[in-house]
Image: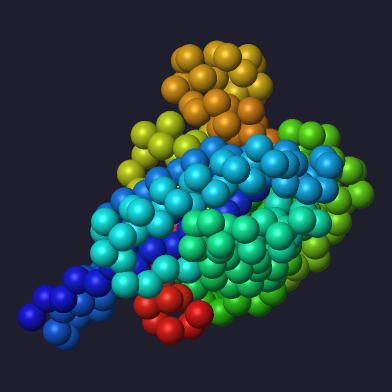
Amino acid sequence: MINIRKFAAIDIGSNAMRLLISNVVEQDGKEPQFNKSSLVRVPIRLGQDAFTVGEISEENIDRMIDAMKAFNLLMKVHKVERYMAFATSAMREAYNAKEVVALIKKKADIKIEIIDGKKEAAIIASTDLHHLLKRDETYLFVDVGGGSTEFTLFSDGKMITSRSFKAGTVRLLNNMVHDVVWDEIEKWIKANTADYDEVTLIGSGGNINKLFKMSGKQQEKPLSYIYINSQYAFLNSLTYEQRIAELGLNSDRADVIIHATRIYLNAMKWSGARQIYVPKIGLSDGIVKAMYYGKI
């Protein structure tokens, strides 16, 4: 007997907003399967508002309301049984966030929860990471967002420690990440990976997914430090317009991808990692799974 249930996750990030609709296939005696039914990404850069002027602008509030109305209609059409909407770094820092959340509930009937970096990292880590983690190895999981980057260290299949830093791509784009933050990240990574002979990176986020796609590699194969380094140099050699025209990048990806690559590169350098795995996981996938298993 096969049963298909539909769940949806809304991820309100600093660079874009996403709606993921998942089919959860339940079959007697088998583990449930999570299959993407639909993914809609809307490039509303809330971080540009929140990190520079401290509030979400009227224009972006209107765009958010329109996007949420559309998301609500899509969920109805797909007959979604349950959804959750989480907002991260940009909304955490906007002083009018509570009003925006109330307005969206009133006008689009979508309830949004603003979560902290720790909860964000925990939800992402609750995805299919356990399938990737070999028991006798050590991994540094790096999730790069627009407003923050979450680092989580795993060893022997267990989470050892986790930390969120205010170093995201939209902040870097606006020159808002000072040397002191980079120093803190370097110290944290070095201190927490020093006791392990070998560390492998696991990367998550739209930019590393794009870099992986550009590599043409098979899903289970890792990218090397040398590859990431050469891509960083290559991307830097192109203008913003060339990255859009020649590499087919979205306009809101073409400017932040360099900054994201720099974060992954530094994480590899400071942890001594020579390889980075890029599984298809993110906050939206984590929300769906955590909902299904009753964790949130």
Residue 238: name its quadrant.
Answer: top right
Name the residue at 49% across, 63% down. Answer: 109
Name the residue at 56% across, 63% down. Answer: 105
Q: Residue furthest front?
A: 106
Residue 94: name its quadrant.
Answer: bottom right
Q: Residue furthest right?
A: 180
Q: Is residue 292 above or below residue 37?
A: below
Q: Is residue 121 visible in this depiction of the protein?
A: no
Relative image position of residue 132 (x, y in whole percent): 43, 65
Q: Is residue 200 above or below residue 80?
A: above
242, 236: nearer the viewer: 242
Q: Quadrant of the N terminus?
A: bottom left
Q: Is residue 269 above or below residue 93?
A: above
Relative image position of residue 88 (x, y in whole percent): 65, 59
Residue 118 left/right relative to 3: right
Relative image position of residue 208 (x, y in whole percent): 53, 43
280, 89: nearer the viewer: 89
Name the residue at 54% across, 19% down. Answer: 243
Q: Residue furthest left?
A: 1
211, 75: nearer the viewer: 75
Name the residue at 26% across, 75% down. Answer: 32
Q: Is residue 32 visible in this depiction of the protein?
A: yes
